[in-house]
Amino acid sequence: MTHMTTIKDAVEDLLNNRQLTVDEAIDRHFGPTFRQRTNGSWDDRAAFRARIIQLRDVVEHTTVTVLDELIDADSYAERHVVDLVKRDGKRIVQEVYVFAKRDPDGRFTRIEEATVMLEQ
């Protein structure tokens, strides 16, 4: 059976599971043609990878609390709160609304998300 990834699993591996390299974490959860749109701005897989490397440098730990999640075949919708604790001790808390598509292997091919700042 194919493992269908979730946003929570992906964020856990991307930002908290430092036993995985960035490339291993991305390959586990994101297909080769992955694209992400955040608040209207598109990133390809290479730009997404660069952003994850930068986040790993500044983020100490991330907690994702899933509020809603809906899966229908290759379509995925989810709403979560992400609590980022940075190495300098500052916190960023955002609510994130996600619509996504997954490939037959269960990895994300496209994510479109909008964020609302809750605490900074």
Image (cartoon, helix red, strand yellow):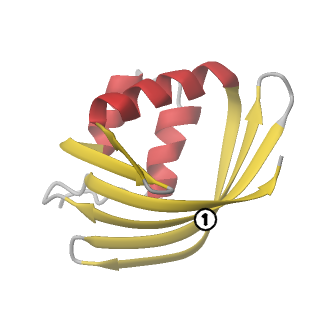
Quarter of the N terminus within the rendering: bottom left
Q: Residue at x 48, y 71 (%)?
A: 78
Left or right: 98 as drawn, with respect to 88? left
Residue drawn at x 39%, y 35% as measured from the top left: 48
- Percent across and percent down for residue 14 are 48, 35
Instruction: Give the crowd class for mark 1: few <14, some 14-19, many >=20 residues within 10 Å.
Output: many
Residue 99 location, x and y as percent? 39, 68
- x, y (%) of residue 57? 61, 18
Q: Can you name the residue that lies furthest to the left here?
A: 104
Q: For residue 96, which quarter of the picture? A: bottom right
Q: Residue at x 28, y 44 (%)?
A: 30
In the rendered view, would you say 31 is above or below 56?
below
Q: Tell me the residue that label 1 is attached to.
A: 80
**What kind of element bears circle 1?**
strand
Q: Amino acid at mark 1?
A: His
Q: Residue at x 38, y 29 (%)?
A: 49
Residue in front for this viewpoint, 5 or 88? 88
Question: For this view, does 85 lie left or right of residue 4?
Answer: right
